[in-house]
Image (tube, grey):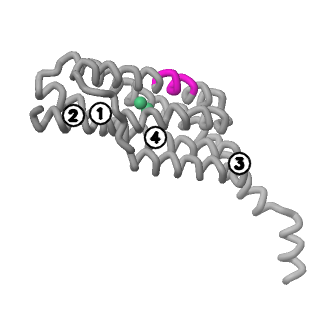
Amino acid sequence: MGQLKELLVEEMQDLLHAETQLVGALPKMVDAANNPQLKQCFSTHLTQTEQHVDRLKRAFELLGEKAQPKPCKAMMGLIAEAEETMSEAGEKDPLTADIALVASAQRVEHYEIAGYGNVYTLARQIDELDVADLLRHTLGDEESADFLLTEISKPILQQASLDDTDAIQKKTHNPARSKVSLSAV
Ligand SMILES: [Fe+2]
Ligand SMILES: [Fe+2]
């Protein structure tokens, strides 16, 4: 096997492990999301992620290689961080918790975008065009998911910012506080 094909197979093994882990992690993110659109986005991406696993398996078949996952330490770390974010969600208001969840999810998508961008280029370079086609399809899903997360988070962020301003104003005009400062005078 040529070195580039070997590298392509190794990178795909890494992605297969990453995607398989995500199939396990995404249902927890669906449960953790407060905003209904965010929930829906995670749920749709779970279905897509299952297709990503299938596409990788088909790509291995086309290359005449076994679909053998290779432990992806980066994705394990990203998922561990997402789980930490979810376990700390109770300490935040629901809007801020959702924004934190989006930040974790986008880290995952960016990792996948980098991975699929590379395997797609490698497959094209060695003329494995059917494999490249499958990988490009998944790359498109990851890019759309990332874009959608940005769009969904915009109104959440705006609302969180309004709530923050309200909370600060209430604090400043708190009669109890004025009393304290008056008596202090
Ligand atoms: Fe994926
Ligand atoms: Fe993804």
Q: Real-space Cα distance between discs 2 and 4?
A: 24 Å
Above or below residue 83? Residue 135 is above
Q: Amino acid at mark 4?
A: Gln
Pointer 1 residue? 12
Q: Residues within 10 Å of mark 1 (few under 14, many from 20)?
A: many
Residue at horizontal 66 percent and vertical 53 percent from the top? 88
Above or below residue 156? Residue 132 is above
Q: Residues within 10 Å of mark 4 (few under 14, many from 20)?
A: some
Report the mark closest to the observer, 4 or 3.
4
Pointer 3 residue? 93
Report the mark closest to the observer, 4 or 1.
1
Report the mark closest to the observer, 2 or 4.
2
Quarter of the figure that contains the N terminus: top left
Where in the figure is residue 63, as x and y percent of width and height? 21, 22
Query: Residues in magenta?
Result: 43-48
Foreground pick, 61 / 36: 61
Taking 91 as reference, is 133 left or right? left
Q: Quadrant of residue 15?
A: top left
Q: Amino acid at mark 3?
A: Asp
Report the mark closest to the observer, 3 or 1.
1
Pointer 4 residue? 106
